[in-house]
Image (cartoon, grey):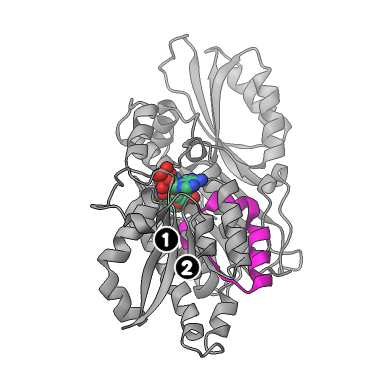
Amino acid sequence: MSLQIGIGLAGLGTVGAGVYKHLAQNRALLVERLGLELVVRRVVARDLTKPRAGLAALPPASILTKDWRVLIDDPAVEIVVELLGGIDTPLALIRAAIAAGKTVVTGNKALLAEHGQEIFALASAQRVPVFFEASTAGGIPIIKSIREAFIANHIVSIHGIINGTSNYILSRMTAEPGLDFADALAAAQAAGYAEADPTLDINGWDAAHKAIILASLAYGFWVPADRVFVEGIEKISATDIHFAGELGYRIKLLAIIKAAATETGQAGGPIEVRVHPTLIPKTHVLASVSGVFNAVAVRGDVVGETLFYGRGAGQDPTSSAVLSDLAEAAFALRPANEQAPDAGADLRRRCYGFTPHGLYGACLPLEEIVSRYYLRLAVDDRPGVLAQVAGALGAHGIGISSVVQPETHDAAGRAQLVLMLDRATHRQVNAALAEIAALACVHPPGALLRVETFGS
Ligand code: NDP
Ligand code: HSE
C-alpha cells in the first residue's frame, strides 16, 4: 500500500466540492505521479446534508463536521485546505493549523491580501508551508511561475485580467449591446464564478486582492491595500463600450503592476499597483480574452514577455490549482513520513510561501501614477465649448491626442464629447476634472477611463 497523507478539507462549496470530486476521480493518476495517496480524513461545512454541485454523493457522515477545530485536533490531518471564504474563521483556522505544524493550502485571496504578512511570518517562524495557487487567476499557475520560473528575474510589469466575473460581464455587454448588467452578473453567479459577496467582483477589490498577492510576490514586500488604486466596473455604460469600440479599444478590468527603475537605472524603484476599467487596443492580445477567462502578461528583465491564459474562476479550474498545491504539499511531507526528515528540508524551506526581501519596498503615491485617459463629457452643443474644455486641460499640462463629437445628441439634447488625453498623473487629471465639472456648458454624468498602450 502506498504512503497516505491525510487532508482536512474546510469548505464543501463551489471549490471544496470540486477538490473532493477530483481527488476521487484522479486518484490513480495522483498515486502514480506522487508515489503516495491523498486521503480526505475530515470535511467541514455548515450544512452537512445538502446536496453539493458536482458531487454525486456526499462524503461519508463519519468525516463530516461543522467544527473546523476538529481538523486541528485530528493527528491524521497533515494538510489543512481552507476553502471557507470570508476572513475571521479562515484566519483563526490558518493560525491554528500553522501553530499545530500542519501544512496549509488556501484559495482565499481576500484573507491573504489583508493578513498575508502575518500569515507568512507565522509560517516562516513555525517552518510550516502555506500554498495559495488557487488564490489568483483560477487554474492558471501564475503563483508558481512568479515564485519559481521567474526566480531570477526582476519583474518589470504584470498586466492581468484576473477577475472572471467582471470579465464575463464586460464581454457579454460588449457582445450584446443593451444587455442588463444585473442579468450578466446573475449568470456569472449561477456558474459559480462570483464571490459569496459579488460586490468584491464588481467594485474591483477581488482583482485588487489578487494584484496585491502578485505584486507582493514579485517585489518581496507585502503591499498594503491602501497603496493600491482601485476602481470597479459598476459605472461602465453601453455608451462607453460603444465609443471605446469606435476608437479601436475594448474595455477590460485590468490589474497593472509595474516597477520603476531607480534614478541610477537599477531595478528597485517604487512600484505601482492599480486595478481599473481600462481601454486596451483591440489589437493587443489581452483585448481578446473573453468570458470567464483570465490572462496574465508578465515581463521579466531576463525572460522578456510571457503570457498565461486560462479559466480564472469556477469549480474545475480552481480545483486544479488546489490539487497542484496539495500534491506539492504532500510531496514535501513525504520524507518525514518515510523517516528521512532531511531529504525534503530544502523543498519545505522554499515552500513557506512568501520570502520577503529588501530590494524594493516603496509604492508610488497614488496621485503620481501616470496614465493616458479617455474622457467623455455631455456638453451643450454650441461654439466655444471645446475651447473651454481644452483650456482647462491645458492649464494643468494635459494634452489632447484626439477628439470625437458624434452628430447625434442624447435625450436631453446634449452632445457627447469624447477626448483621448495624453499621459498625465492622477493629480493633474483630478485637478483638471474639478475645473471642467464647474463649467456651465458641461453636464453630468460623464466618464473618465484609463487607457493602457503597453509601452507603445
Ligand atoms: P462557497 O461559498 O461556495 O463555499 C464555502 C464553503 O465553506 C461552504 O461549503 C460552506 O458551508 C463552508 N463554510 C463557510 N463558512 C463556514 C463556517 N464558519 N463553518 C463551517 N463551514 C463553513 O465558496 P467558494 O467555494 O466559491 O470559495 C471558497 C474560497 O475559494 C473563497 O476564499 C474564494 O474566494 C476562493 N476562490 C473561489 C473561486 C471560485 O471560482 N468560486 C476561485 C478562486 C478562489 P455550507 O455550504 O454548508 O454553507
Ligand atoms: N470571483 C472570482 C472571479 C473567483 O470571478 O474571478 C476567482 O478568484
Which is the main secondary structure of the residues drawn in magenta?
A: helix
Tell me if 171 is positioned left or right of 272 in this view: left
Q: Give SS at disc 2.
A: loop
Q: Nearer the viewer, residue 101 or 408?
A: 101
Q: Is residue 256 visible?
A: no
Residue occupying image coordinates x 46% and y 82%: 334
Q: Which residue lies furthest to the right in this view?
A: 263
Q: Is residue 63 inside the magenta stretch?
A: no
Q: Give SS at disc 1.
A: strand
Magenta region: which residues? 108-134
Quarter the N terminus occupies: bottom left
Q: Which of 92 and 226 is in front in this view?
A: 92
What amino acid type should be assigned to the residue bearing mark 2? Val
**CB contact under 8 Å: marks 1 and 2:** yes
On screen, residue 238 above or below 36:
above
On screen, residue 232 above or below 106:
above
Residue 95, position as x, y percentages in the image: 62, 59
Give the label on residue 77, or none.
2
What amino acid type should be assigned to the residue bearing mark 1? Arg
Residue occupying image coordinates x 71% and y 51%: 364
Q: Name the residue under label 1.
A: 42
Residue 401, position as x, y percentages in the image: 56, 38
Residue 247, position as x, y percentages in the image: 43, 37
Residue occupying image coordinates x 30% and y 62%: 22
Q: Is residue 121 inside the magenta stretch?
A: yes
Going from the N terminus, do you reach mark 1 or mark 2 first?
Answer: 1
Mark 1 Cβ and ligand 1 under 8 Å apart: no
Q: Residue furthest left?
A: 56
3D distance between C-alphas at marks 1 and 2 = 8 Å
Tell me if 253 is positioned left or right of 358 in this view: left
